[in-house]
Image: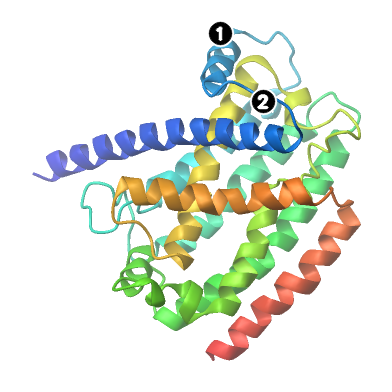
Amino acid sequence: RITMDLLTRVLFTLLGLFIILNWGLLMNAIMRKLTARVARRVGIRWYQPWINLVKLYSNRNSIEHGVMFQLGPVFRLLGGLGLMIFMPLIYGSEYFSNFSFAGDLVIILYIKFFGMLGMALGAGEGGHPYSAMGVSRGLSQVTVVELPFTLAVIALAVQYNTLSLHEIVAAQQGGITNWTLFTNPVATLAAVLSMLGIFMHSPFDLVRAPNEIPIGPPTEYHSSYLGILRTNAAILHVIEAILFMNLFFGGATSWPILIIKTFLIYFISILVGVVFPRFRIEQSVSWFLRVPLILGIIAIILIL
């Protein structure tokens, strides 16, 4: 009986992963299309991300920089898959709750940092002379982004008296006014501002540094390595949007609701990226240590 229950849960987790991956690829194409339209360009075809993945995975890499360089994309993908495994997707669904448990929020906060650290170790072993610059930028921004976001999560844990995502979503049922967005707007604002750095679009796309110098994963890694990173990006962006949806926007009781909410949450970062130019690293760190961090501290004070 236990074996059958475990097998059923694994199968539905894989089904959820399949849906999340394809939705992430489609959402990426839609967002790139919207961004192109703002710049008065045509943009990519909606099915281009799938074509890119097939081409990347069909190629092989002959460049060798060491074991950690090869493991970097794997660790990055494991970070996204780890979030997926412990993330409840559909509230009220026994099959799409994945492997969430009473303290899943704690392990999710740990796993969020795992992929970035693995990627930093891999890039640090690469042959590009600016790898150290990309690693320092990425880790500096991730650190200051996690501070206000963690404070917002702590405020929610105190407010709902739980570290379970399922229970936090359950507390927000019964109407839109029960969402954390309305019951704790300060923590929500701190987390949403942190979210801009988590998604790493302009003005916080400091690791890739578009239009500045050719560094970052698309240059360091290519062929199947880049395919792994693209796969993780499709999964991770949706899963991170689901995390914010569960914490602040009432969760989802069906797949259509999940798709709509994750699209709107992800669209916030795209809209900001279209409007604002990229920050320098010192500007980004300073901004996160002022506005979102202060809001996170206020959220903690108000909830105590």
Q: Residue under circle 2?
A: 43
Q: Name the quarter where the C terminus is drawn.
A: bottom right
Residue 134 location (% of width, % of height): 82, 40
- Upstream in sequence: badge 2 or badge 1: 2
> Callout 2, which amino acid?
Gly
User: Which mark is drawn over residue 20?
Assistant: none
Residue 137, placed above or below residue 220: below
Q: Secondary structure at mark 2?
A: loop
**Which residue corresponds to the image point at 8% horizontal and 44% vertical from the top-left?**
1
Residue 82, placed above or below residue 299: above
Label 2 – label 1 distance at C-alpha: 24 Å
**Which residue corresponds to the image point at 30% horizontal and 34% vertical from the top-left?**
15
| Residue at the limit of the structure toward the left, as seen here | 1
Q: Residue under circle 1?
A: 58
Crowd rating for badge 1 (residues with CA inside 10 Å; few <14, some 14–19, many 20+) = few
Q: Nearer the viewer, residue 203 or 133?
A: 203
Crowd rating for badge 2 (residues with CA inside 10 Å; few <14, some 14–19, many 20+) = some
Residue 267 location (% of width, % of height): 59, 49
Q: Nearer the viewer, residue 40 or 51?
A: 40
Residue 78, placed above or below residue 159: above
Counting the numbered discs, the total is 2
Q: Secondary structure at mark 1?
A: helix
- The reply, left or right, for residue 84 in relation to residue 300 is left
**Which residue corresponds to the image point at 84% horizontal and 30% vertical from the top-left?**
215
Residue 283 location (% of width, % of height): 88, 59
